[in-house]
Image (cartoon, grey):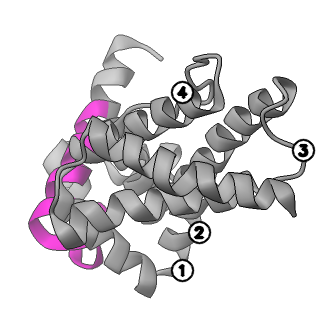
């Protein structure tokens, strides 16, 4: 991508995030994004086929690329804490009102829900899958455990903390989630 193309993309994604925060997903339009970014709708549609894809790209740009290759600490516990730390850091850096609005919009817009699930939620399953693959190779876990379920549990606990309890998303919470919830569940699942 050329420098000009990268700048144009950044302007479009920035305009998307700004409008999401101001008016929400339902009221955000491609026309408004184009006007805010000083880009043509044709430019936007060449890169993103619809509003849902554009929003997911903007949110993903803000949170950074997915950690397809999570840190390898040499232990299952260490790897789980490292992945949860990445997830909590990403969540902590997000605008919680923007995320909450996006979650609400997903309930009403199947296209947005599909795009978020395919591109964001799926990434977490891949990351946990890699952690589990390493743990199986080290003999810490048996093969066949559902990494996606543990990605959901970790994500749900982090979201609950952010949106419901308001308690800090800190290192102590990542350790608690690993030691008191995920590892005991994995131990139980491993015996079955």
State the separation of the CA atoms marked 3 and 1. 34 Å
Q: Which residue is mark 4?
A: 78
- Badge 1 element: helix
Residues at badges 3 and 2 in contact (C-beta under 8 Å)?
Answer: no
Outermost residue toward the top in this view = 3
Q: Residues within 10 Å of mark 3 (few under 14, many from 20)?
A: few
Q: Earlier in the sequence, mark 3 or mark 1?
A: 1
Q: Nearer the viewer, mark 3 or mark 1?
A: 3
Q: Is residue 4 in the magenta section?
A: no
Q: Is residue 137 above or below residue 52?
A: above
- Badge 4 element: helix
Q: Is residue 25 in the magenta section?
A: yes
State the separation of the CA atoms marked 2 and 4. 32 Å
Residues at badges 2 and 1 in contact (C-beta under 8 Å)?
Answer: yes
Q: Residues within 10 Å of mark 1 (few under 14, many from 20)?
A: few
Residues at badges 4 and 1 in contact (C-beta under 8 Å)?
Answer: no
Residues at badges 3 and 4 in contact (C-beta under 8 Å)?
Answer: no
> What span is colored magenta in the figure?
10-32
Q: Main secondary structure of the magenta part?
A: helix
94 sits left or right of 190 in the view? left
Q: Earlier in the sequence, mark 2 or mark 4?
A: 4
Q: Which residue is mark 2?
A: 114
Residue lying at 43% horizontally and 51% vertically, measured from the top left: 177
Q: Which residue is mark 3?
A: 143
28 sits left or right of 71 in the view? left
């Amino acid at each position: 991508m050329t420098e000009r193309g990268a700048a144009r993309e950044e302007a479009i994604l920035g305009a998307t995030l700004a409008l999401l925060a101001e008016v929400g997903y339902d009221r955000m339009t491609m026309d408004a994004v184009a006007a805010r970014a000083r880009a043509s709708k044709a430019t936007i549609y060449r890169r993103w086929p619809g509003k849902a894809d554009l929003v997911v790209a903007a949110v993903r740009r803000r949170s950074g690329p997915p950690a397809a290759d999570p840190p390898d600490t040499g232990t299952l516990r260490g790897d789980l804490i490292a992945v949860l730390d990445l997830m909590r850091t990403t969540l902590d850096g997000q605008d919680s009102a923007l995320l909450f609005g996006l979650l609400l919009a997903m309930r009403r817009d199947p296209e947005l829900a599909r795009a978020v699930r395919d591109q964001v939620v799926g990434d977490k399953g891949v990351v946990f899958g890699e952690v589990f693959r390493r743990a199986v190779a080290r003999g810490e876990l048996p093969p066949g455990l559902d990494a996606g379920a543990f990605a959901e549990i970790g994500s749900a606990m982090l979201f609950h903390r952010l949106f419901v309890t308001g308690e800090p998303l800190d290192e102590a919470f990542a350790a608690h989630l690993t030691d008191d919830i995920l590892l005991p569940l994995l131990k139980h699942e491993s015996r079955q």
